Amino acid sequence: MYITTKNHSGTTPGHDRDSLRPDCSNCFALCCTAFGFARSADFAIDKPAATPCPNLDQDFSCTIHDRLRPRGFRGCTVFDCFGAGQAVSQQLFAGISWRDAPDSRQDMFAAFKVVRQLHEMLWHLAEAQERTFDADSAREAKELRKIIDDLGRGPLPGLLACDLESLHSAVRTILVAVSEEVRAGYFAAGTDQLDATLRPGADLAAANLRARKLCGADLRGACLIAADLRGSDLAGADLLGADLRDARLDGADLTAALFLTQPQLNSARGSNATLVPPDLSAPPHWQDG
């Protein structure tokens, strides 16, 4: 079953999200510098935070971009900055790179870490505003988006001093309320009650959920690592923060799933038969099998 959602302004879900997509051509490779990583299945080497990756070229491009997975840098292909890279590089720091202004490195990298979180909140709030049928919830989401957007634009001292924990809490309250509202619509329309194991934070690693009707399931924060979701219907399922690493999504219908992000899709396994929300894209590695 598929339930069509409409917003109060008549636009489609995801309207306003273009600025929250990565534009690496306008970024000073902040994801390749600000964050550190340890040698693992996702990264072939150790790299301390606030240092350039050895694969970074002088023009801020990646010298192995088309070979990241075979070279052991799967983690790079999963990451998404929600447009924080270009916002910090071009707006907060006026297009002057940390190489041209070395004294800016610490603040630029710190700002990137904050703005990425703010932009992910904006991504989810945009969906909440569009998916809710409640005018008060839509207004609250819109107002909080304005607060977070203004904060992300600077000035820098205020941005770096912001209370991220309080913002996360405020966003979470709205997302939970919208999730409950949207998911309730599936049960009101006659969807069967779901197994009690399908709950927020559930450990469903390697679970066999193949060809299941999971409409309206609350899987927030669930561990779905290597779970078999092939052919399942996840319309209205809340996937906020769910761990989809290596989850099998071949033939699954995610078009109306709630609070799904590109990094989650990037970490999963899928195919040409996987249906994804219109604001997201099937990762290139899905085509490789």
Image (cartoon, rainbow, N blue to C red):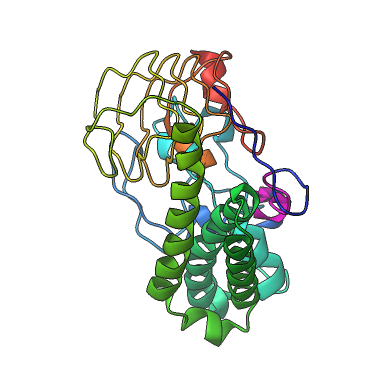
Q: What x and y, as percent, mark residue 204?
A: 24, 30
Give above or below for 131 relative to 64.
below
Give above or below for 27 relative to 228.
below
Give above or below for 40 relative to 204.
below
Q: What x and y, as percent, mark residue 23?
A: 68, 50
Magenta: predominant secondary structure element? loop
Left or right of residue 99: residue 190: left
Left or right of residue 274: residue 51: left
The reply to whether residue 267 is in sight is yes
Q: Residue shown at 39%/46% (left/top)?
A: 241
The reply to whether residue 73 is in sight is no
Q: What x and y, as percent, mark residue 97?
A: 65, 68
Q: Is residue 76 magenta?
A: no
Viewer-closest of 207 and 113: 207
Q: Which residues are magenta?
A: 13-24
Viewer-closest of 16 and 32: 16
Left or right of residue 9: residue 142: left
